[in-house]
Amino acid sequence: MLELAGDLKKNFWKEADLDVLELYADWNLEDGSGMLLAVLEEPKSHKYKWPEKVDEPELRKGVIRLSIVGQKEPGETNFY
């Protein structure tokens, strides 16, 4: 993962204008699943608008529910 971190950070910046401060990964190769978590600088205005088809409150509930199943409810959940 360390060898990919620089490329991933560069692509976050290139594609979405996001400055990644820290990058974490957790993989379960047997289940074929994994997760990337990026810690970003303070939010900035983004060139992408929130998709109209996505119900943000429902998405937020789903993310929190999955976080609880995986470990515990996060103290804060932000979407940009």
Image: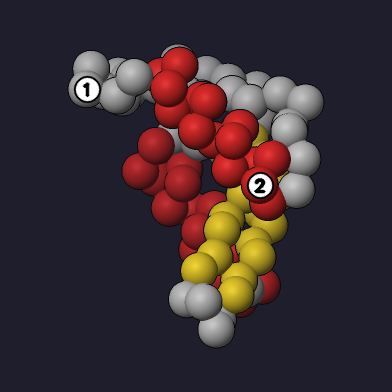
Q: Is residue 6 left or right of residue 39?
A: left
For numbered disc 1, what is the local secondary structure?
loop
Query: Above or below — where is 73 with respect to 70?
Result: above
**For the N terminus, which image quadrant?**
bottom right
Left or right placement of residue 51 versus residue 43 in this view: left
Q: Is residue 54 visible?
A: yes
Q: What amino acid type should be assigned to the residue bearing mark 2?
A: Val
Q: How many marks?
A: 2
Point out residue 41 in the picture as x, y percentages from the top left corner. 66, 30
Q: Is the C-beta separation of discs 1 and 2 under 8 Å?
A: no
N-terminal label among 1 and 2: 1
2 relative to 36, above or below: below
Task: Name the residue: 47% across, 43% down.
Answer: 13
Q: Residue at x 55, y 71 (%)?
A: 4
SS category of the residue bearing label 2: helix
Judge whether residue 6 can be spotted in this image. Answer: no
The type of residue carrying mark 1 is Lys
Location of mark 1 (residue): 53
Q: CA distance from mark 1 to mark 2?
A: 26 Å
| Residue closest to the far left | 53
Instruction: State left or right for residue 67 relative to residue 12.
Output: right
Place of residue 78 in the rendered image (x, y in percent of width and height, measured from the top left): 59, 23
Return the residue at label 2. 69
Q: Is residue 54 above or below residue 17?
A: above
Please name whichever residue, 8 or 79, is drawn nearer the observer in this view of the structure: 79
Q: Nearer the viewer, residue 49 or 42?
A: 49
The spot of residue 58 in percent (x, y) is 43, 22
Badge number at residue 37: none
Of badges 1 and 2, nearer the viewer stands 2
The residue that appears at 39% across and 45% down in the rendered structure is 14
Mark 2: few, some, or many residues within 10 Å (few <14, many ≥20)? few
Q: Position of residue 38 (x, y in %)?
A: 62, 46
